[in-house]
Image (spheres, rainbow, N blue to C red):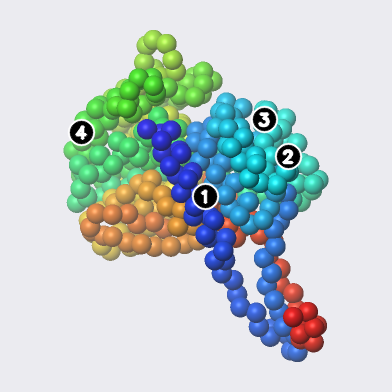
Amino acid sequence: MVSHDDVAQTIDTFRFMAGAARSITSQASADYAESHLSVILREPLGVIGVVTPWNYPLLMAAWKMAPILAAGNMLVLKPSEQTPLTTLKFAELVADLLPAGVFNVVTGYGSVVGNRLSGHPQIDMIALTGSANSGKALAHNASESLKRVHLELGGKAPVIIFDGANLDEAATALRAAGYWNSGQECGAGCRVLVHESVAAQFTDHLVREVGSLVVGEPGAGDDVEIGPLISKVHFERVCGFLDRARAQGIRAALGGTAIPGPGYFVAPTVLTGVPDGAECSREEIFGPVITVETFTDETDAVARANAVPYGLAASVRTENARRGHDIPTRLDFGTVWVNAHLVLANAVVTGRRLRCLDVPCDGCCEVRASLRRATGIGGSQGSQRWYRGTVEPCARAEIATLI
């Protein structure tokens, strides 16, 4: 299921960016200085280095490749050492479509190849999708040459569920939004904040939905929804979070342990009775785990939601139109959905603040803003950030001569 999504969204990304590069909008030329015409030029940055992650190896590469190439740049891409094959296959397929040297793939470990790319004097910009620690290391290396940096890092997306919301619908949505790709998704709805008056009822709905997820080997059949974690190291990291949560007295209403047998499988987990500030509700677990906390009122919900070091995504569940408009503006996250979660579209460009409300009806609302905090700098989609924008005041006579 995830692999099909990876390919389908990659195709849509390239199709969208091919058109987007031909419809760049900018400020009009004008006489900002007396007797001079100022012209804004969009020029390629040059050579851009890219480091991509393992969770969506093809799509995350496409989110970088498509706009970078469409804007006229050259690209050196390092895929994750754990999942390089789709990127290498893509490079093979386009080898005779692009001029030599325009698109390049270099494999290896991030500590070696990633550091070399970020510090190389002939790389004009470096972009990474990965962990906060990887982003810090890359930004530090890039600072030596003062190159531009684009980082898309971690997330710990809160899902605020108010009293009066459709609890059954919310639980059904989180069955996918919280556990897609075994929870190895930076925008996963993994931290539920539910009003105390409906917490028990919602938890029952959520446990029922999550308990129906089919766990198995990815190739075992189309009905498999939860596969193994990426590696032994990551498996042990996720299990460590669960062990520490259990030691803190946090109850697993479902799952909470590894699944016995071969493979790095963790049971789909719902942790309840999670206290404010608990590690499992603040840090990115990146596994099939949802935590459930309660809140008393709107102020409490917003404060708790914002009290994490990540600012990638969040969502709000409500049938109240005022809340649907107001609460997203108070949440310090780059993307906020209303009555939906993890609904993405290439046409909605990360880095802008847009609002498309459908409250109290079904549908999705997205409020996108610049990524910040431990989430990173900038967003992935969009072609304009891969240009060098210049404003040049020129004498009118010179412009006339050039034309």
Determine crowd level at label 4: few under 14, some 14-19, many 20+ residues with C-alpha closer than 10 A.
some
Give the residue type at disc 3. Thr
* Mark 1 or mark 2: whose residue is earlier in sequence: 1
What x and y, as percent, mark residue 189? Answer: 37, 41
- Name the residue located 36 percent from the left edge and 53 percent from the top edge: 337
What x and y, as percent, mark residue 255? Answer: 31, 22
Q: Secondary structure at mark 2?
A: helix
What x and y, as percent, mark residue 290? Answer: 35, 33
User: Dots 4 and 2: beta carbons under 8 Å?
Assistant: no
Q: Indicate which label's residue lies in the foreground, 4 or 2.
A: 2
User: Dots 4 and 3: beta carbons under 8 Å?
Assistant: no
Give the residue type at disc 1. Phe
In space, the residues marked 4 and 2 are separated at their CA atoms by 49 Å
Q: Write down the residue under mark 4.
A: 204
Q: Write down the residue under mark 1.
A: 14
Determine crowd level at label 2: few under 14, some 14-19, many 20+ residues with C-alpha closer than 10 A.
many
Q: Write down the residue under mark 3.
A: 107
* Mark 4 or mark 2: whose residue is earlier in sequence: 2
Q: Indicate which label's residue lies in the foreground, 3 or 2.
A: 3
Residue placed farthest to the bottom in the image? 35
What x and y, as percent, mark residue 178? Answer: 36, 37
Q: Indicate which label's residue lies in the foreground, 4 or 3.
A: 3
* Mark 4 or mark 1: whose residue is earlier in sequence: 1
Q: Write down the residue under mark 2.
A: 117
Q: Secondary structure at mark 1?
A: helix
In space, the residues marked 3 and 1 are separated at their CA atoms by 23 Å
Residue placed farthest to the front in the image? 96
